[in-house]
Image: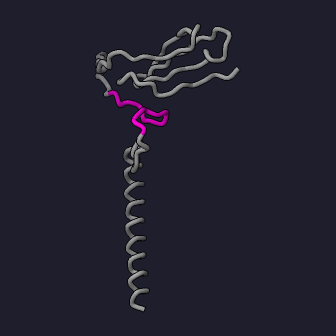
Amino acid sequence: MQALKVLVGGLGILIVIGVTVIGYGLYRKSTDPGFKFFSSGDTSESVTAPPARIPAAPSGQTIPLPAFGEAMIGLPAGCTIDGVSGDGARIYLRIGPNGTPECSRVIVLNAATGAQIGVIRIAR
């Protein structure tokens, strides 16, 4: 009977610890949407990564972004960049069609680091 009491007490303690960890995770996720308890080991930036935070400049002034050097973006043979746009945290490269589906895409880059965040393929 004593062993059963120890087992139930131990499981109760584990339940309290689990609920505490879940509560802490919910709190951290509400304050930092990019928070993760465990990393997948993949160090590359994913599509779900939060955008780079760029400080707001007083009106009439600009804040220079840090330089990131050279970023290599791979394109299929014969594809060209049709347009470039951005929203401050991201750069969007519109890749023009050359008659093949491989060229119909938008490449999204992180403006602060130059890292490729993702590719949006356009189905035709």
Residue 77 x, y percent position in the rendering: 57, 10
Scheme by which the image is coloured? one colour
At 46% from the left edge and 28% from the top edge, which residue is drawn? 117
In the rendered view, would you say 74 is above or below 42?
above
In the rendered view, would you say 41 is above or below 89?
below
Q: Please state which of residues 57 and 103 is positioned toward the viewer in this rendering.
A: 103
At 43% from the left edge and 32% from the top edge, which residue is drawn? 45
* The image quarter in which residue 17 lies: bottom left
In the rendered view, would you say 8 is above or below 106?
below
Q: Which residues are magenta?
A: 42-54
At 40% from the left edge and 45% from the top edge, which residue is drawn? 39
* The image quarter in which residue 89 lies: top left
In magenta segment, residue 53: yes
At 43% from the left edge and 92% from the top edge, which residue is drawn? 1
Residue 70 x, y percent position in the rendering: 36, 15
Chief secondary structure of the magenta portion: loop
Considering the image in quadrants, where does the C terminus appear? top right
Which residue lies most toward the bottom here? Answer: 1
Residue 123 x, y percent position in the rendering: 67, 23
In magenta segment, residue 8: no
Residue 4 x, y percent position in the rendering: 43, 86
Q: Please state which of residues 19 and 58 is positioned toward the viewer in this rendering.
A: 19
In the rendered view, would you say 78 is above or below 122?
above
